Amino acid sequence: MKIAIGCDQFAYDLKMVVLKHLESQGHQVVDYGCKEGEEVLYPNVALAVAEEVAAGKFERAILICGTGIGMSIVANKVPGVRAACCHDVYSAQRARKSNDAHIMTMGSEIVGYSLAKELVDTWMVSEFAGGRSKPKVELIDEIDKKYKNK
């Protein structure tokens, strides 16, 4: 699978662990930064990645900052994107199964390397289950359409 990844300077080390982990599993990972030692404003990275996901260039993406919250907020501003901040295995699984999240965000100050790999593995193998969640996700899509051109 082709996956986008991005981070701010606080999450560079964790991003590199996740990137190498995904590549070791055969995924094609495109790095949107930041580079080692580079200072960036996380909204710029989150926006660039989310726009690419919304355009269909990537099925999924991972964004990492200090808490994961800021990246999630920015990514969710882009119509057509569903980003979920995940810090435990259950939320990583449900982000896909219940919410069909395209982007997973996490915090480098919250999760360690081993947990991050476990979250990514769980999120990557989980698929949208539909069922009771389908009308909710469809409603989210309708809300996106309503505000897309405003």
Image (cartoon, grey):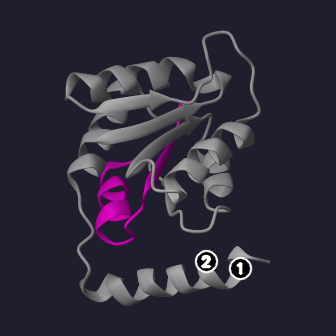
Q: Quadrant of the C terminus?
A: bottom right
Q: Is residue 42 left or right of residue 91?
A: right
Question: Measuring 20% from the left and 29% from the top, which residue is drawn there?
Answer: 26
Q: Is residue 1 left or right of residue 147?
A: left
Residue corresponding to mark 2: 144
What label sits on residue 147 in the rendered view? 1
75 and 105: which one is in front?
75
Question: Extreme top residue here?
Answer: 37
Residue type at the position of mark 1: Tyr
Q: Which residues are magenta?
A: 88-109
Question: Extreme right residue here?
Answer: 150
Q: CA distance from mark 1 to mark 2?
A: 5 Å
Q: Is residue 141 left or right of residue 29?
A: right
Vertical position of residue 133 compared to residue 90: above or below: below
* Residue 91 figure quarter: bottom left
Residue 59 in the magenta stretch? The answer is no
Question: Measuring 45% from the left and 34% from the top, which residue is drawn there?
Answer: 111
Residue type at the position of mark 2: Asp
Element assignment for label 1: helix
CB under 8 Å between callouts 1 and 2? yes
